[in-house]
Image (tube, rainbow, N blue to C red):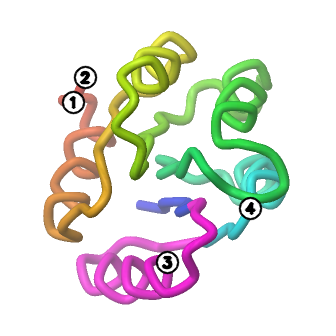
Amino acid sequence: MKVLIADDDRQLCQFFNAVLRNYGWEVIVAFDAAQALVMAKNGTPDVIVLDINMPGGTGIGALEKLSMNMKTSMIPILVLSGSQDPIIEDKTKALGAVGYIHKPVDVEELHRYLQKIVKGEYRQ
């Protein structure tokens, strides 16, 4: 399975990349929202993990564009954010995110979420 991790925290992405690869995931990484949009269209991930606060456009904006694009609209998106604002969480769900988890997140917990999402078992 292929996962796109879109987060501007390079160390976090490197860590997720290393651990998720050990679980058998193919990982592609984007460090800003614009790059995430391109990689989602060209990389055909099975699931996207999307941070909200990134350069190159917001995660909310990326989520809106991904959900409106025919090529990416069916890709499940899990929002991973340090924001505790319930309005942002509600907005991401309204835009089609399958889940919202707060940072910091344990990578094993993230792996479990991803497994459930690709199996169609997770809806927050």
Circles 2 and 1 in contact, beta carbons < 8 Å: yes
Task: Residue at 29% x, 39% y: name it.
Answer: 117
Task: Residue at 63% x, 69% y: name it.
Answer: 8
Q: Where is mark 3, residue-wise?
A: 13
93 over 2 or under it: above or below: above
User: How far is disc 2 from disc 4 in space, using C-alphas?
Assistant: 26 Å
Comes first in the chain, label 1 or label 3? 3
Q: Which mark is residue 122?
A: 1
Few, some or many C-alpha atoms within 10 Å of disc 4 (few <14, some 14-19, many ≥20)? many
Q: Residue 123 carries which label?
A: 2
User: How far is disc 2 from disc 1 in space, using C-alphas?
Assistant: 4 Å
**Tag in front: 3 or 2:** 3
**Tag in front: 2 or 4:** 4
**Picture coordinates of residue 18 (x, y %)?**
37, 89
Circles 1 and 3 in contact, beta carbons < 8 Å: no
Please give left or right for residue 105 compared with residue 80 in the image.
Answer: left
**Picture coordinates of residue 73 (x, y %)?**
65, 25
**Tag in front: 4 or 1:** 4
Amino acid type, callout 3: Cys
Circles 3 and 2 in contact, beta carbons < 8 Å: no
Please give left or right for residue 108 compared with residue 13 in the image.
Answer: left
Amino acid type, callout 1: Tyr
Part of the protein shown in magenta: 6-28
Element carrying mark 2: loop
23 over 7 or under it: above or below: below
Task: Residue at 55% x, 35% y: name it.
Answer: 75
Q: Where is mark 4, residue-wise?
A: 32
Q: Quadrant of residue 104?
A: bottom left
Amino acid type, callout 4: Asp
Few, some or many C-alpha atoms within 10 Å of disc 3 (few <14, some 14-19, many ≥20)? some
